Image: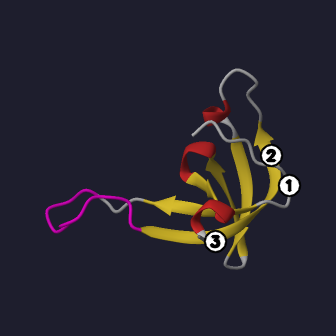
Amino acid sequence: MNEKFKKGDLVRILYKPFNNILTINPKPTAFKTGIIIDVITKSIANPDWEVYLVYTDGWCDTFPNRRLISYAKNSI
């Protein structure tokens, strides 16, 4: 992905279903929309290792860059 986000960017959070016997389609299907509040961990060498504080659905949580997708790319 190698995409860097900054404070105030709208992102989509990728959720993968649990791998169990009842899972028919193990591909990532669920997305939630959130906004970047802060950059927790920065990495100059590899942006995939960065961790962001994201506000979504009334709560904040940290997510790695690998689970975030820019909202503008998905709105088309």
Of residues 3 and 54, the one drawn nearer to the viewer in this rendering: 3
The colour mode here is secondary structure
Mark 2, secondary structure of its residue:
strand
Neighbour class for label 2 at 10 Å: few (<14), some, many (≥20)? some
Mark closest to the chain's N terminus, 3 or 1: 1
Mark closest to the chain's N terminus, 2 or 3: 3
Q: Residue at x 60, y 53 (%)?
A: 68
Q: Residue at x 76, y 24 (%)?
A: 44
Q: Residue at x 38, y 60 (%)?
A: 28
What residue did someone put label 1 on?
A: 7
Neighbour class for label 1 at 10 Å: few (<14), some, many (≥20)? few
Asked if residue 28 is among those painted magenta in the image, a careful observer would answer yes
Q: Quadrant of residue 61?
A: bottom right
**Left/right of residue 54 with respect to residue 39 in the rendered view:** left
Q: Amino acid at mark 2?
A: Val
Neighbour class for label 3 at 10 Å: few (<14), some, many (≥20)? some
What residue did someone put label 2 on?
A: 39
The image shows residue 3, relative to residue 46, as above or below, that is: below
Mark closest to the chain's N terminus, 2 or 1: 1
**Left/right of residue 42 with respect to residue 48 in the rendered view:** right
Q: Specify start and end residues of the magenta stretch as a single range.
A: 19-29
Of residues 72 and 33, the one drawn nearer to the viewer in this rendering: 72
**Left/right of residue 29 with respect to residue 35 in the rendered view:** left
**Left/right of residue 39 with respect to residue 33 in the rendered view:** right
Q: Quadrant of the C terminus?
A: bottom right
Q: Are marks 2 and 3 in contact (CB under 8 Å)?
A: no
Q: Amino acid at mark 1?
A: Lys
Q: Residue at x 76, y 48 (%)?
A: 5
